[in-house]
Amino acid sequence: MKRRLTMGVAAAAVGTLLAACGAGGPGSGGGKISGGKLTLGVLTDLSGVYADLAGNGAVAAVQMAADDYRKKYGDKAVTQKIDVIKADHQNKPEVANTQAREMYERKGADAIFDVPTSSAALAVETVAAQQKKLYFNTGAATTELAGKSCNAYTYEWAYDSYMLAHGTGTQVTQQGGKNWYLIYPDYAFGQDMQAKFTPAIEGAGGHVVAKDPTPFPSDNYSTFLLKAPTLNPKPDVLGALQAGGDLANVVKQYDQFKVKDKGVKLAIGLLFDSDIKAIGADKLAGTMFTTAWFWNLDDRSRAWAQRFQKVTGKLPTFDQAADYSAATAYLEAVQKAGTDKAASVSKVLDGMPLDDFFARNATVRAADHRVVHDAYLAKVKAPSEATQDGDYTELVRTIPAAQAFDKPSPDCHLG
């Protein structure tokens, strides 16, 4: 039976987050809004392999946060003028660098959100530090953002490769997948995923038989898929650490070459609902994965997802949900600080507890600006188990916030 959702539940979900952020006003920080308005930049993949999981949906999520903020505060808002701008980084760090500078310098962005692709995110993080403007990462998984590359202007909101590896890698190994063959995209995200999955697998009693970097992006993985069953020892598990459109190509070709029939099961490092839709739930049924959030987790999640779907025509991914969460927290921090000055906003954010529809039992960790929150071990439902279109995911267990993320890196010095 389909669940009937109400706008009242959605409003309650939003209210929980807003209350958690504090209820200051324009005078509470004694500052002002530069230029009389706020500008929120969404730097994302609008046309490539990550467009479905982020893209225009990320822009819509940030716009929803701005609209909700204006509605909540009315005349008491530090400003009713909030512009949401967007740009396509094309999954290229040099383009991301240029676009971030354009947003901060010429378009007056107070904060940038999203940025899938770890190499692009690292480029934006550098620009944010140089410009002394805030950046909220939701799309990139590399732990370097809160590690050796961390800075005082960057916040890690959604997930990272440690969370993924110590969920999926550990669980699949403990369930009998002792020998692994890892294939990973040859850029910052994939390299970091491989570096985190290997110790997670070994720590659970497994062994990485081989690991190969793959071109990014790519539509041909035949060399690696045909190699898997020939390795000695033969792997029990093929660990596919790609994402988005690249992951869809891996899974489709894994099925095409009948790798499963040759005794090599598939494990996936990062999976979004948009990937399941693109690949087909029938091909992924029973697949275990770790996620930061999924839209049908509970009533709070479903309520916001319904609102998002009305705006975009699609159900949200966790990246898009995290964009809303981060943008709302940012706006609440500006409201409480009474200014858009980055240092003043950060003073409000650092150490702040959160419990919204996305970030459960969460804290904005002051030491490294990582948002530590509950994560979820999940599996893909068989199509026969779905209660409605887009109902792909079943919760296996909740990973408490304290276990989901690593402790602060000694390499991080916010400065």
Image: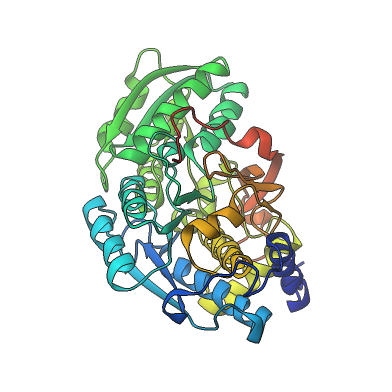
Decide: is 65 above or below 122. Answer: below
Q: Is residue 296 visible?
A: yes
Total marks in image: 0
Decide: is 164 above or below 62. Answer: above
Residue 140 percent coordinates (x, y): 42, 48
Near-viewer residue (177 or 63): 63
What is the basis of the colouring in this image?
rainbow
**Is residue 336 left or right of 226 when viewed as pictured?**
right
What residue is rendered at 44% in x and 51% in y?
153
What residue is rendered at 54% in x and 51% in y?
157
Near-viewer residue (135 or 76): 76
Rendered image quadrant of residue 222: top left
Residue 29 percent coordinates (x, y): 60, 66
**Is residue 200 left or right of 303 when viewed as pictured?**
left
Q: Residue furthest bottom?
A: 75
Quadrant of the image containing the N terminus: bottom right
Near-viewer residue (196 or 156): 156
Rendered image quadrant of residue 18: bottom right
What residue is rendered at 76% in x and 73% in y?
4
**Is residue 352 left or right of 143 when viewed as pictured?**
right
Q: Residue furthest front?
A: 30
Residue 101 percent coordinates (x, y): 27, 62
Residue 413 percent coordinates (x, y): 45, 35
Quadrant of the image containing the C terminus: top left
Q: Is residue 257 visible?
A: no
